[in-house]
Image (cartoon, coloured by chain):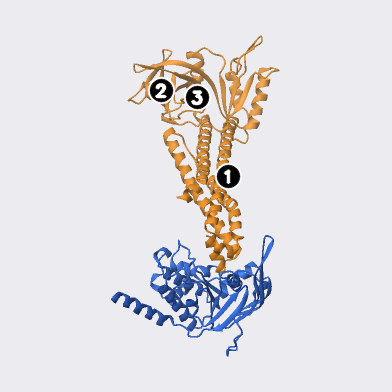
Amino acid sequence: MIRFAVQTHPVIKLADIHKVYHTGEVDVHAVRGISLEVFPGEFVALMGASGSGKSTLMNMIGALDRPSGGNYLLDGIDVSTLDRDALADVRNEKIGFVFQGFNLLSRTSALENTEMPMLYNRHRIQSHEQRERALHALNLVGLGDRADHHPNQLSGGQQQRVAIARALVNRPTLLLADEPTGNLDTQTSIEIMGVFQKLNDQGITIVMVTHELDVARFTKRMVILRDGKIVTDELVRERLSAEEESNRLKQAQLAVKLA
Amino acid sequence: MRSLLTMLGIIIGVGAVIGSVSLTSGATKQVEDQVSSLGESVITVFSGNFTSGAMRGGWGSAPTLTVADALAIAGLKNVVAVSPEVRDRAQVLANGLNWNTQVMGESPDYPQIRNWGIASGVMLSDQDVRSLAKSAVIGKTVADQLFPNENPVGQTIRIRNLPFLIVGVLAPKGFNLFGQDQDDTVVVPYTSHMHRITTRTFVSDILVEAANDKVIDSVQKDITDLLLVRHRSKEQDFTVRNQLELMQAVTATSRAMSFLLAGVAAVSLVVGGIGIMNIMLVSVTERTREIGIRMAVGARAADILVQFLIEAVTLSAIGGSIGIVGGVGFSKIVAYIKDMPTVTPVTWIAIAFISSAIIGVISGFYPAWKASKLDPIDALRYE
């Protein structure tokens, strides 16, 4: 375990988490005793090959699924005992999801997509406030001028930015990203990682699932899983800055053009 | 496009209900108007049936009613007007033209009983009855046929070669329930009819107007009792009928008709509901991913349920509205082509709209429930 100087309570506190799937006759033990703490302001990459249990772990961290055994405290709330509706409320208030496939609603504008999580807020938010908050979130990801565009009018990178804005709009304690750059080219990936780095600099806690080491090097901490257990948990050395990488890539492209 | 096809069942169902109800209630209204144009509290006394050996004639075949009977009835309580009626068809001549029409012998009360106005001139008077006057009031059709371009009042009309002075023209009344042109008539004093045009001692029937429709039954009974005594017969040799009975018979028919049509329409609505359920099930499958996203960002099962229910209700309510408009339009077109009156009762519009919304709820519930029970992880992964 890595100890941090910051003495606040952890955003994520997993204690000996197990998950067993009963499929047919065979029980699949996807997660076998994981303990993990993530503190505010961290930027964690959750890595592992397919079948390592990282998706299962992410589903549990994201309150989409409950562990079969062990305890999970999210921002101090014991998620492992909540029912379906309470889990939905936790997802709404505490977690912002960013998916690999963007998962925007195609028939609604960027602004409406961003407003969507607020529809399910337990405390009713006035429509003008919804609009303001959605616009603010879109500005944060640099898409304030495209609020009325529909997803099919936006590039992949822009769609993912809308998804990030949507994840941020309910002011979650945790941003959970599942392979956010999986569908994007290198340059756009770097841009998106830049957005995440900027948000993290502003104090937002991010947990990102990825299997690409290149992408993980933009984060601060790498947790590697294998066969449902944590095998490595270390700080990222030689952390990449999205800004520098982007500049380097542009220069390389320029060089290719000149040559 | 697909939503339109989905709604089609509801549109047709509601359209059929509204259209058929409009037409049948229009027909009912027409009947009611005609019946009330005859006078709502009118009682008709027909003479009895003629029996010769084993052969029995129909009502009115045996002359049993007399003018004296009519005068006796006029003395009863709650009777406001009486007209002994004598009917005959005759060739009438005027102005070098001739026309075969119904010649009626009536009392001056006739327009009041029949709710019939005088368009020009005056009605026959009691004096005309007493003096067997050769005065006549003619209907619109007769006036049009014999006096195409002039005012008939003051002119002479010949009935069976007897000259009658036209004192008035009746207001147009149109066709009655049985399709007869009520304006094709000439009305003369019943005394003149019985002694000058024909030689009769009995009247065809007696028209009686009761004070209001509440006392009809008691007046009807009084007439029956009176005539039984007057005729000194063991068997009732006359029949007493009122307009309400007639109206009830006719409206019962049209009500049965509208129930039949409503039944057909209800089947169509059920089919429409199945269509909506089907399309909603497809929609839930197609939008599994959307449901997953919504659940991931915090939608509860109830939120998803409500969303899909609202969609189903919206679909069927829009379908219902289009159906209402279509049904009203259809009935108007039929009304225009067939020259029939239509009435679209507001209650039926409300019933149609509410039932289409209820069908939306019923048919949308299962798909919506299915959507709400999806697991967010599976839904998100769904391709």
Q: Which residue is mark 3?
A: B126
Give the Cα separation between the discs numbered 3 and 1. Answer: 65 Å
- Circle 1: residue type: Val
Counting residues from the start of the chain, the first of labels 3 and 1 encountered is 3
Quadrant housing residue B67 = top right
Q: Which residue is mark 1?
A: B270
Answer with left or right where residue B74 lies relative to residue B333: right
Using a 10 Å C-alpha cutoff, classify the residue at mark 1 as few (fewer than 14 neighbours), some (14 to 19) or many (20 or more).
some
Give the Cα separation between the discs numbered 2 and 1. Answer: 54 Å
Nearer to us in this view, B142 or B194: B142
**Subunit under mark 2:** B
> Residue A143, can we see it?
no
Q: Which residue is mark 2?
A: B142
Say which residue appears at 45% left-offset and 81% top-offset: A198
Colour given to chain A in the rendered image: blue
**Subunit under mark 3:** B
Label 3: element kind: helix
Task: Give residue B258's position: percent from left, percent from top.
Answer: 56, 37
